[in-house]
Image (cartoon, coloured by chain):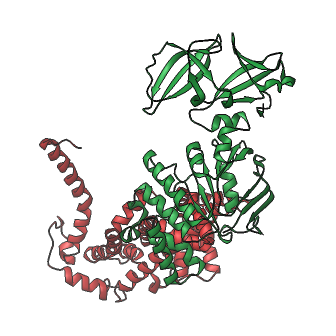
Amino acid sequence: MIENRPFLKFIEHLVLILGVLVVAFPLWMTFVAATHDAARMGQVPLPVLPGPHFFRNLDVVLNEGLWGGDGSGVGYMLVNSMIMALLIAFGKIVISLTSAFAIVYFRFPFRMGFFWLIFITLMLPVEVRILPTYEVVAKLGMLDNYWGLTVPLIASATATFMFRQVFLTIPDELLEAARIDGAGPFRFFKDILVPMSRTNIAALFVILFIYGWNQYLWPLLVTTDQSMYTIVMQIGRMLEGAEEAPQWHLIMMTALLSVIPPVLVVLFMQKLFVQGLTETEK
Amino acid sequence: MASVTLDNIQKTYPNGFKAIHGVDVEVKDGEFLVLVGPSGCGKSTLLRMVAGLETVTDGSLKIGEREVNNVEPSKRDIAMVFQNYALYPHMSVYANMAYGLKIMGLGKAEIDERVKNAASILELTEEQLERKPRELSGGQRQRVAMGRAIVRKPSVFLFDEPLSNLDAKLRVQMRVEIKRLQESLGITSIYVTHDQVEAMTLGHRLMVLNGGNVEQLGTPLELYEKPASLFVAQFIGSPAMNIVDTKMHENGNEVTIAQNVSLALGGGRLKDRAGQALKLGVRPEHLVISEEGANTLPLIVTLVEHLGADTLIHGHFGDDKTDLTVRCSGTQSVKVGEKLPITASLDHIHLFDPATEKRIEF
C-alpha cells in the first residue's frame, strides 16, 4: 500500500499483531511451561505467566534428564542432532550441486534419462521406501551411527532440480568466456558456478538444516543405542516414557532447547535466504 | 601476431542443418576483417568456429601456421569479446581480467602489470578495477570485456557483436575506440556485426555472408562501388539501394525503365542480353533532381524525411508504382504529392541478372 490512510494503517497493524499472537502463543506457552515446577504444571488452569524455575529446569534437563531416566541429560542429543542436520545439509548440497553440474553442462548418453530418474525419486521419500532402506542400511552395518542416520536422507531430487534451474539461468557466454580463459570443467565449477550460486546454496542450507534437524521417524528406526538418540526423538520418547504423568516442565524445556539451533540458523542466514529464493538476476 | 586461414570451412549441425557452406579466406597479420550479414546468416557460427566454441565439420582452420581444428579455445592464442560482455558477475573487474592469466600460470607481478596496463589503455580507473561488473555502466563493462581480451596478448581478437547492447551514441564512441585500439595494437581481428555502418567503418575488408554462403569479400569501398550481387547491393549502404525491374532493348544498347524513359548504356557490350529482363540498381545518393526534360523519371513524392544534413525523398513512378528513394544533401523544400524529374548518372548504375542475382559488368 502506498496510500497513507491512518485507518488502513491501523487495520494492517491489527491483522499483523493478531497473526503474530496466533503464531507465537504456543511458543510462549512452551516457554512458560519450562519455567514452572512439576506441581504447578499439574494444576488447572495452566499458567500463562513465567514462573521462577527456569534455571533449575534447565539444569535438570541438561544434567539429569527425566525422573526415572538413566540420569544423563539431553546435551549429547543436541550434539547428535546438530551433527545429523549438518551432515544432511552439506551432503545434500554437495551431491546435488555436482549432479546438477553433470546434467546441465555435460552431454552424455541418457542424460535426460538420468535427470528424470533423479526426478522420480521425489515420489519416493524415506517414509515410502522405509523397509528396503532399513534393510540396506542394516546390511551395510550403518545402524547406530551417523552414516546410518544421514546417508539415506542425503540423495535429493529437489535440491538437484533447484540447482539445475539455477545453472540454466547462467548465460552460456560465461561458460564460453571461461573456456577461452582456459578454465577446465572443475575450475569452472569451483570458480564460477559455485560462487554464482552462493545465495541459492545458503537458502538451501537453511531449508535442509531444518529438514535434517526435524527428522523423527528415520532416527527412531535406525538407532537403538541411546548415545545416538537425537533431540527430536527424545521429545517423543519423553511423552510416552514413564507410567506416571508426563513431566511437562522438563519436556517443554527440552522442546525449547531443540528450537534454538534452527532459529539461530534462520536468524543469521535470513538475508541470504531471501536473496537465494527471490533473486533471479545473474 | 598471426594470420588466420580458413580453407573450405563448413559447418553442419547434428540435426542436418548446414550453417556454413564452405568459406575460404585468409585474414592477414594485423588485418581487421568484418563478417557482416543479416541474422541467421552464419557469421557468428563462423566466428565461434575460429574461437573453438563450435566444432569444424569440414575444411581446415589455421591460426598462424598451425592447424587448430581440434585445439581447445584456450590453446588457440585468441581472445574473444562477447555481445553481452560475459563478465563473471561475482568477481571484481580486476579479477575478471586476471582470471585467464592466473590459469595461464603467470606470476602475481606479471598479472598486475598486464591488468594495470590494459586498464590505462582503456581508461579504467584504479577505483573501477575494484568494483563488480554490475556497478559499471554498459560502456565501461564493454571496456572491461575488451580489457580481458587485451591482457591475454593474443594473436587474434574475436569480436561477437560487441556494440549491439550499447545505446547509439556510445556505440559510435566505442566504435572509434575499437578501431584505434586495433590499429595501435596491430592485432589481427575478426569482428561480427549486423550493422553495415559498423562494418564499413571498422573493417579493412568485409565478408558479406548470406545463408551460410560468402556473397562477397572485399574492401568497404569495393563492396559499395561494385557489389557482386543483389544481396550485397541492398545490404551495404543506407538507405538501401533502389532496385528497378527493367528490360534490355532489342538493340542491346539501352534499358527501358518506365514508359518513355530509357537509359543508354553498355555501348553495345550487352548485346547477348538483348530483350532480357534485368534488375537495375542505383543508390539513393546517386539520384539527382534535374530539369524537366526527356529521359527523366517522373517521381511522385509520398514521404519526405528531413535528416538535417540530408533529405530523403520517398516516392514512386510508372504505372506499377515502383518505389524509389532519393537522397539529397541539405534541406529540400519538397512536398508530398509533388512530381519531381529524376535522373541518374551512368557511372553509378548497377545491373544484376534477375535469375542468378549476380552483378553484370558493362
**Front-most of B48 and A83?**
B48
Give left or right: position of A88 versus A269: right
Q: Colour of chain A?
A: red
Q: Is residue B362 above or below residue B294?
A: below
Please name the residue shown 75% across and 66% down the image: B68
Q: Residue furthest left?
A: A6
Residue A196, image x and y in percent? 48, 66
Q: Is residue B288 above or below residue B340?
A: below
> Camera-side residue: B139 or A7?
B139
Residue A157 lies, with reference to residue A242, above or below; the image says above
Q: Is residue B95 left or right of residue B187?
A: left
Q: Quadrant of residue A127?
A: bottom right
**Residue at coordinates 73% horizontally, 25% vertically from top-left?**
B279
- Quadrant of the rendering where the N terminus of chain B is positioned: bottom right
Q: Position of residue A182 (x, y in %)?
A: 62, 72
Chain ID, green in image: B
Tell me what residue is drawn at x 50 percent, y 80 percent.
A223
Residue B152, above or below B146: below
